[in-house]
Amino acid sequence: MNNQQTDVLQASIRLISKLDLKKFIFEFVSYYVVVNLILFVLGGSFQWIFLIVVFVFTGLYLLVKHWINRRQLKKIVMGQFDFVKTNHPDLSLFIPIMEKNSSHYSINRAALYFIHDKLYLDAFRQTGFASIPSESISIPYGDDFVIKEAFQTNDALLFNGQLIDTAYTFAVARQPELIEALRPYYPKNEKEV
């Protein structure tokens, strides 16, 4: 694996596994309140020791949960990469595709890749949290897969395109190598978001 490929994979994993602080705080407060209410109903009063213990264990639980999710997402991205590399030995660059949900990015069951300077999209059949896809469909850039618009954010490139007569929106990690590699495939009226 070359340095460019390593940088793309690491940037993608970093982007999809970034700790969402708003979600973390919301979950922390929710779990903390619910567990303390249950302890109050069972015990009849608030005890300081329980408040402190619940505070510490809630924080530890959420941090461990984030760490486990990060490891699983890394396994999924690397599994997709290995699957495409196995099926297409001439692969020159693999680009994980993400979906943007409000302020968070999640991994998609598809990826872009280059073979001899031609762009392809691979759509994976991947159940649940399976780390390796069972099969895929490769679609070359052209009639069935087209990128119509591109937007840049601080951390990602967002694309609006068309996939077999259906609108298709996706994101990739913002890396200088990716901007240059994908530039011939999207219109020049790129927008900054």
Image (tube, rainbow, N blue to C red):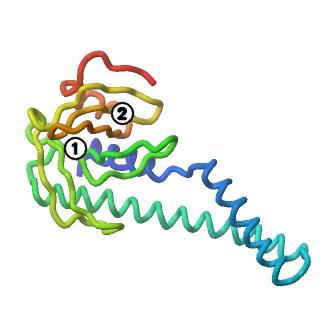
Task: Say if mark 1 contacts mark 2, CB within 8 Å.
Answer: no
Residue lying farthest to the top in this orientation: 189
x, y percent for residue 158: 36, 33
Q: Residue at x 36, y 67 (%)?
A: 129
In the picture provided, is 8 more to the left or to the right than 39? left
x, y percent for residue 16: 43, 50
On residue 158, the disc is 2
Local secondary structure at mark 2: strand
Query: Closer to the camera: disc 1 or disc 2?
Result: 2
Q: Residue at x 60, y 52 (%)?
A: 23
Local secondary structure at mark 1: strand
Graded by Cα atoms within 10 Å as few (under 14), some (14 to 19) or many (20 or more), the crowding at tag 2 reads many
Quadrant for the C terminus in the image = top left
x, y percent for residue 164: 15, 40
Foreground of the two, 15 or 186: 186
User: Label 1 sits on what residue type?
Assistant: Leu
x, y percent for residue 15: 44, 46
The residue singled out by tag 1 in the image is 112
Q: Is the residue 31 above or below the residue 183 in the image?
A: below
Graded by Cα atoms within 10 Å as few (under 14), some (14 to 19) or many (20 or more), the crowding at tag 1 reads many
Q: Residue at x 56, y 52 (%)?
A: 19
Which one is earlier in the sequence, the residue at label 1 or at label 2? 1
Foreground of the two, 15 or 106: 106
- Hey, which quadrant is residue 8 in on the image? top left
Q: Is the residue 104 above or below the residue 80 in the image?
A: above
